[in-house]
Amino acid sequence: MQERLQELKADALKQVEEANEVKALQDVKVQYLGKKGPITEVLKGMGKLPKEERPVIGQLANDVREEIATAIETKKQKLENEALEKQLEEETIDVTLPGRPAPTGGPHLLTNLIEEIEDLFIGMGFEVAEGPEVEADYYNFEALNLPKGHPARDMQDSFYITEEILMRTHTSPVQARTMEKHEGKGPVKIICPGKVYRRDTDDATHSHQFTQIEGLLVDKHVRMSDLKGVLNAFAKQMFGEEREIRLRPSFFPFTEPSVEMDISCKMCGGEGCSVCKGTGWIEILGAGMVHPNVLEMAGYDPKEYTGFAFGMGPERIAMLKYGIDDIRHFYTNDVRFLNQFHKA
Ligand code: 2U9
């Protein structure tokens, strides 16, 4: 019986040695120390043994059980520690490693461009004025010398909400409101950026929603040359000192006289190319001296005050600047397009 117990112990300890996972140890435990295990058998068979052998066998059986149990527990600890070490090893985070950069968004290229243009005019003493996008027909049209039924209204097909309320078709109503607030006194020197809406079918050059930046300067003795000076300064700062500007006669109901401002074409330096359609000039904005009717309706006496105004489309300037061929890119939020302009 003692050899049997030694043998059992040796087999059990061998299996414990070879076990490389806790489950296997569990099996050894059940196999050797379990109710139906050989050690239990031996202890159950004590009664059949000679009286004098029982204490020896009994003690040996308990020692063997103890030794196997201890060996199993020790190996279990060892395997669990190794597993923990391995897990720690695998899961060790090198906190010195740079984190995975969370994809950050950034200002839309139009926002950057509008702020760039704002800064240029703020540098010339203009203040930024903003106003409602849902506007009254009076400020969007009548105050701008576009009385009800005026044909020019059709040029700006509009999203009417009621007879008297519409989505503004330009930011000019902001200037009209600002002048009105001045009650015909003192200078007004503002630029008005913002979203405008026209009931247009979207295509490569038209969008039902787009942005504008308009400007207005009203004071005593404001002349066309002041307008030209401001536009020239803007063009050179925005497009380069080497660029020339040219003013061409034009027409707007809210300015008289009215002009379009062109800049010399960057691609051909004015020689004529596909970008400037052979003219050597690129149209950038419209402007003019504020129409006396508009001054009057805002409470300014046109005999005492004069003013100039201008208006541009930031999308158009961005398309020229970055060679973008479709205005819809600005609004369809394709990150592949937007990320190209993402200032890191
Ligand atoms: C007041 C008086 C005059 C604003 C002006 C333009 C010329 C102009 C276009 C630019 C691009 C519209 O989006 S666009 O197609 N605008 O050419 N805008 S003068 O004149 C005003 C505005 C307000 C009280």
Image: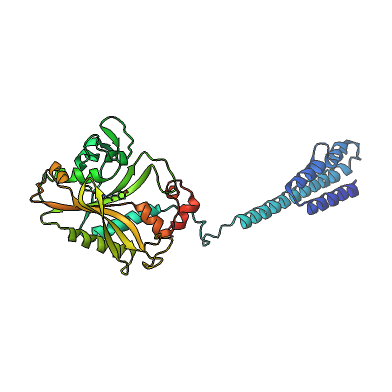
Residue in front for this viewpoint, 170 or 342: 170
Q: Name the residue located 73 percent from the left edge and 47 percent from the top edge.
A: 22
Q: Name the residue located 21 percent from the left edge and 49 percent from the top edge.
A: 255
- Apparent side of residue 271 relative to residue 54 in the rendered image (left or right): left
- Apparent side of residue 202 relative to residue 83 in the rendered image (left or right): left
Residue in front for this viewpoint, 223 or 104: 223
Q: Position of residue 297 (x, y in %)?
A: 14, 41
Q: Name the residue located 42 percent from the left edge and 59 percent from the top edge.
A: 322
- Apparent side of residue 220 relative to residue 119 in the rendered image (left or right): left
Residue in front for this viewpoint, 238 or 89: 238
Q: Position of residue 224 (x, y in %)?
A: 18, 58
**Quadrant including the C terminus:** bottom left
Q: Position of residue 86 (x, y in %)?
A: 66, 56
Residue 276 in view, yes or no: yes
Q: Quadrant of residue 133?
A: top left
Q: Position of residue 156 (x, y in %)?
A: 31, 41
Residue 103 in view, yes or no: no
Residue at the bottom extreme of this rendering: 242
Q: Is residue 30 above or below residue 304?
A: above
**Quadrant including the N terminus:** top right
- Apparent side of residue 184 relative to residue 64 in the rendered image (left or right): left
Residue in front for this viewpoint, 284 or 127: 284
Colour convention: rainbow
